[in-house]
């Protein structure tokens, strides 16, 4: 129902829009579900933490390091993975990514020592490298920039939807399956939640078309119309080679901006259950149900922002303002950690702001990257920005271990989000991205 409503509202009823609506209906539901599974397998360790720390005798710092090591593997293999996808095709490469990460996610259920936990998290990052930037790159093959904002927002709606589904599901699995067949609830969580990724990998292998020219379900005239819009959009881009990407100060600036936003994203993903438990809520199922409140607000916010950004063709404020709202949310959490009401308000603002800023961000690099440069540039920006996925839990975990409070770490996250917003407004020209 959510996908149908979003896609129906996405494109107006003129012939070109109807054609792109058909394209969206062809594969966006599959990509959306794939992103839900990806985000769930990436951050369900945040729920597993509620039990596995005692089971494995892990400290908060060790947990933060292990959670973040995922992003070291992700960083090292992201650019080569995206270049391989550009060469080999999305269908085979994305399917390979999903199946291998599902198997490694399952392996989390059998870790017994901190070293084993670190190794599996690192390899999980290696396996997943290229998945998200690969899908962003894939959308550039099918949608011009003025249609792509809503598609990226729809794709990344998988983030809050994963929170809406994953919170109650993770809480239920840990509550209901504790001790079944000799396994703890956190082990069942990893086993059950990895299964959809295997099935989706097989579905993508059978169903996805690599390029417009490969789509047997489109007529020659329809293929030509889509390709003409894509080619006209690509003609205004300036970075078409790998060398141009690595030499571009603008690309590295975008890496820094994304880093600040992702600091907030994984503060939510890895620490939201801990923040809620800090208000006095102990039952995993209740914590899971409470996480649906911030994610519901985030889902509504990002869909509205995606539609509004494409309609007005304004990009910078649609990123900066949500980032500032998220910073205010983390500040509220840091200052009111013992209040359930204020903590939930802070988490709702933080989640809505971060989850809205992320899909809006991707309008910036895709406005000037093209061809092989797009494959390399999107991957470079994503993997460098996602190093925050290592820094965020590691820094927050270290600070919590030494200060016995999350507040200092949450203030750091609020600061990085504020810096990202200011960098966008100060250094990204409106003429470059507002189209």
Image (spheres, helix red, strand yellow):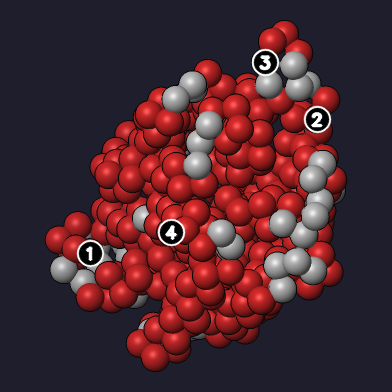
Label 2: state its secondary structure.
helix
Comes first in the chain, label 3 or label 4: 3
Comes first in the chain, label 1 or label 3: 3
Label at residue 395: 4
Label 4: state its secondary structure.
helix
Query: Could you tell me residue 258's position as x and y percent?
Result: 42, 67
CA separation in Å, label 2 and label 4: 29 Å
Neighbours of disc 1 within 10 Å: few (<14), some (14-19), many (20+): many
Front position in the image: 251 or 216: 251
**For mark 2, what is the residue?**
175
Report if the CB atoms under discs 1 and 4 are less than 8 Å apart: no
Residue at x 67% of width, y 15% of height: 183
Comes first in the chain, label 1 or label 2: 2
Label at residue 183: 3
CA separation in Å, label 3 and label 2: 12 Å
CA separation in Å, label 1 and label 4: 30 Å
- Looking at the image, the residue that sits furthest to the bottom is 426
**Mark in the foreground, 1 or 4:** 4
Tell me if 273 is positioned left or right of 400 in this view: right
Residue at x 63% of width, y 23% of height: 187
Label at residue 245: 1
Report if the CB atoms under discs 2 and 4 are less than 8 Å apart: no
Comes first in the chain, label 1 or label 4: 1
CA separation in Å, label 3 and label 4: 31 Å
Tell me if 353 is positioned left or right of 101 in this view: right
């Amino acid at each position: 129902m959510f996908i149908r409503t979003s896609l129906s509202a996405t494109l107006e009823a003129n012939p070109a829009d109807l054609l792109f609506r058909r394209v969206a209906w062809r594969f966006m539901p599959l990509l959306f579900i794939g992103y839900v599974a990806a985000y769930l397998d990436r951050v369900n360790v945040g729920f597993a933490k509620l039990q596995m720390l005692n089971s494995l005798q892990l400290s908060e710092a060790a947990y933060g390091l292990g959670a973040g090591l995922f992003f070291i593997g992700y960083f090292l293999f992201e650019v080569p993975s995206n270049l391989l996808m550009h060469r080999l095709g999305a269908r085979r490469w994305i399917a390979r990514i999903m199946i291998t990460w599902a198997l490694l996610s399952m392996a989390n259920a059998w870790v017994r020592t901190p070293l084993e936990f670190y190794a599996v998290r690192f390899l999980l990052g290696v396996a997943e490298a290229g998945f998200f930037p690969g899908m962003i790159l894939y959308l550039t093959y099918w949608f011009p920039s003025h249609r792509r904002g809503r598609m990226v927002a729809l794709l990344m709606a998988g983030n809050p939807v994963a929170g809406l589904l994953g919170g109650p599901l993770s809480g239920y699995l840990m509550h209901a399956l504790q001790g079944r067949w000799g396994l703890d609830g956190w082990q069942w969580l990893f086993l059950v939640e990895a299964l959809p990724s295997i099935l989706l990998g097989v579905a993508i292998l059978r169903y996805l078309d690599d390029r417009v020219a490969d789509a047997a379900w489109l007529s020659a005239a329809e293929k030509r119309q889509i390709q003409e819009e894509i080619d006209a959009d690509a003609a205004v881009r300036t970075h078409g080679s790998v060398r141009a990407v690595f030499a571009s100060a603008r690309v590295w600036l975008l890496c820094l901006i994304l880093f600040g936003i992702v600091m907030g994203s994984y503060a939510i993903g890895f620490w939201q259950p801990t923040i809620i438990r800090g208000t006095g809520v102990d039952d995993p199922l209740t914590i899971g149900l409470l996480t649906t409140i911030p994610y519901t607000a985030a889902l509504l916010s990002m869909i509205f922002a995606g539609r509004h950004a494409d309609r007005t063709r304004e990009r910078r404020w649609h990123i900066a303002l949500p980032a500032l709202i998220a910073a205010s949310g983390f500040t509220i959490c840091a200052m009111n950690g013992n209040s359930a009401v204020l903590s939930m308000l802070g988490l709702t603002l933080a989640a809505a702001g971060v989850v809205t800023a992320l899909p809006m961000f991707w309008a910036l690099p895709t406005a000037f990257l093209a061809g092989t440069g797009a494959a390399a540039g999107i991957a470079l920006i994503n993997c460098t920005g996602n190093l925050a996925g290592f820094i965020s839990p590691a820094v927050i975990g270290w600070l919590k271990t030494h200060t016995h409070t999350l507040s200092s770490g949450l203030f750091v996250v609020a600061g990085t989000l504020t810096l990202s917003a200011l960098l966008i407004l100060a250094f990204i020209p409106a003429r470059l991205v507002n189209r």
